[in-house]
Structure formats: structure tokens, C-alpha cells
Image (tube, rainbow, N blue to C red):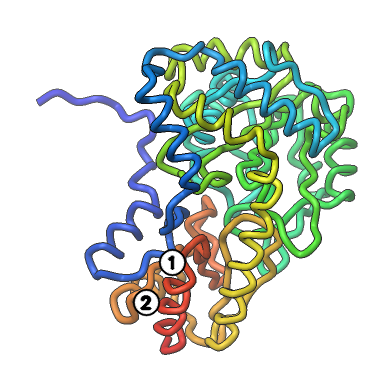
Amino acid sequence: MMHIQSKLPDVGTTIFTVMSQLAVQHQAINLSQGFPDYECSPELIKLVDHYMRSGYNQYAPMAGLLSLRERIAEKQEKLHHVIYNPDTEITITAGGTQALFAAIACVIRPDDEVIIFEPAYDAYGPTVTLFGGRIRAVELSAPNYSIDWLEVSKLINDKTRMIILNYPNNPTGRTLDENDIKCLINLTRDTNILLLSDEVYEHLIYDGKQHLSLSRYPELRERSFITASFGKLLHATGWKVGYCLAPQWLMNEFRKIHQFEVFSVNSFVQYAISDFLKNDRNYLEISDFFQVKKDFFSALMKETRFDVLTCNGSYFQSVQYSRISDEKDTDLAIRIIKEFGVAGIPVSAFYSKGTDYHVLRFCFAKKKETLEKAVEYLIKV
């Protein structure tokens, strides 16, 4: 029998897949994986259908449809008062995760160190490892999940190549404030440290907070890859269309990787999204849409014995269960699926060491009746 030596021997099936499979197996309401259970805009569907039937079914340009890159540049200027050149500084990707992969792949070499903040999206660590890099994790503690920048500074050395941030954050819902930005600027000034800012939830922000994109700050923009996704914005996670913003000197390297990963992204969807974004209400009003869902779900959850944590962004609500049980979060999450019919995600899965603050994450990007039914079951826990 032939054998290979795994490049990722410690990586198994993601917790999102595991919990979704358990939800199907036990016919549970799935609030674990982050996807809506309602349809995206009928107008957008018509646009996709139009362009598919009109023959836009061949390769798009490697960097993406120019008109879509122009829409993204317009959006970035309108929201963050920054200009990106759509020809040289914006690339359309096959979802946000592919953008993350390409950004890491084009700069990380063996023994480079990458600082991440945990709880962290599970794609960062394995991708860094795949290219020989080493993860240096800063653990953030529930319930506040604030960044100890002094701890971050102690990790920085000559091998530090990149810092990865994800704000609004999955799973905590936390956002950056101006002090965080000031600290980040001070730590990276006069260094060769690059930044990878995962801003996939940039438009899903609540309670009067403002999304502080790293693109707003010249000192950070000059060293940053900024990745985002249309999946969350358009309620169409299955289309896998995202993008990356970066200064030209970084984008040149990004595209060298991107062209051999996917070369280009499906063309007819790019045409449709480009047309759809001409109406800025389609992205300016998304925050209000999800604010209603967040408030509705959190109000319902207050009828349970779970303690609702602060959520200023993303479409995930984290809750602590200290008043319910002292079980491991993975054990409780599985038991809730089997005994109560609701699937969530144990937040320890977002820590490399499995750190457990007795927190579960639920997705509220669901129909009102789905959320009502789920909480009806969760009240019994």
C-alpha cells in the first residue's frame, strides 16, 4: 500500500461540518454553520439568470470583471474614504477563504511567525502551517474578548512576518476601536510586518458601532491585504465570490498565487453582482436588516438560562452557559443537538489549545420562525 506524509497531520474535519452533519442526523435546527435559511434577492437571481442565458459563461479575466472591481473601489471610497485602483489593487476571488489562502501563500516562508487572535477562524492556522510558518496565538478571554496589546508586543520579533485580524470577529462579534488601531499602528511602524485583515463581516455591524477597516489608515493600508466576501453581504454563501484589496506591490504577488489556484471566478455571477451593487442601498441597508435579527434573537435568548454576550458585528450570537452546566462546551453542544434539537458551535473549537470558557455560538441569519422554534427548544436546556 502506498503512503504519503500529511502536510497537515493535525487537521481533521472542521467543527462546522461536524455539527452540521449531526444536525442532519438528528433532524436538529442548524444554527451552527453560518448560512441563511432564506433566499437572496429575487432581483439578483434574475440578474444571474440573465447573464447565464446571455452567454456569459466563459472565463472571466484573471483579476476579475473590471466593472465589479470598479464597484468595489466605489464602495470602498464611499464607506472608508480611500481609493484603490481597480486595475492593480483589487482582485476577485473564489470566496473569502481563497483570498485568505492566497494572501498567506504569497508571503509566508518556512519559520516565518504569524500572530493571530483566538478565538480565530479555523482557516488561518492550517494555511500558515502549510507554507512552513509558525502560529503565535494571543488568546482573548470571554466575555469581553479585548486585545492585550502588551502581550502582542512581547510576541513580536525579527521572525514576525504577519498579523492576522478578523473584525467584526467570528465568533465573538467584537469590533475594533480607535485604541486598537492606534496600538496596531505603533506596533508595526518601522517594521516589515504585513497585515491580513479578514473583513468578511464588514457590513454586518450594530448598535451604532462603525467598522474601522484597516484601509482607512495610511500607515496600515500600505502593508495590508484586506479580504472580504459577497456571500455574507448578498445572502448567497454558496456562490463563493469574494475579493482582496492590497497596494499594488502586494497585489502583484497575490495574483501570482491566485492565477494558479483558480485563475478566475465564475463570470455570470460577477456580472450580476456588478449590476446589483450599482444601487448602494443593497449594501448600505444590510446592517439594519441584520440588526433586527440580532435584537430579535438576543431578546428571545434572554428567556433561556444562557447568558447573552455582547455582539457588535457578524451574524453570530455567543452565549455563556455557566448557569446551566459545567460540561465541556463540545459535550454540551453535542448533547443539545441530540436531546433538544438545536445545533450550535462550541467556541473552544476556535482556540488551538481548545480553551473553554463555556461559550457556544449560534447563527441568527435565519428566518424569524426558525429562530423562534430554536429558542423554544433552548428554553428547555
Q: Is the C-beta separation of discs 1 and 2 under 8 Å?
A: yes
182 vs 255: above or below: below
Q: Bin the neighbour count of mark 2 within 10 Å (Cα to Cα): few under 14, some 14-19, many 20 and up.
A: some
Amino acid at dot 2: Ile
Measure the alpha-carbon separation of dots 1 and 2.
Answer: 8 Å
Q: Is residue 230 visible?
A: yes
Residue 59 location, x and y as percent? 41, 13
Q: Looking at this view, is 93 or 352 the one in front?
A: 93
Give the structural element (helix, strand or loop) at label 2. helix
Residue holding disc 2:
336
Residue 263 location, x and y as percent? 45, 14
Residue holding disc 1:
344
Q: Earlier in the sequence, mark 1 or mark 2?
A: 2
Q: Is residue 180 left or right of residue 40?
A: right
Q: Is residue 219 left or right of residue 29?
A: right
Give the structural element (helix, strand or loop) at label 1. loop
Figure quadrant of the N terminus? top left
Q: Bin the neighbour count of mark 1 within 10 Å (Cα to Cα): few under 14, some 14-19, many 20 and up.
A: many
Q: Please report the residue visible at 58 percent of the width from the left and 30 percent of the height from the top.
A: 275
Q: Looking at this view, is 323 or 352 the one in front?
A: 323
Q: Looking at this view, is 21 or 372 the one in front?
A: 372
Residue 16 location, x and y as percent? 40, 53
Say which quarter of the image contains residue 315: bottom right
369 vs 162: above or below: below
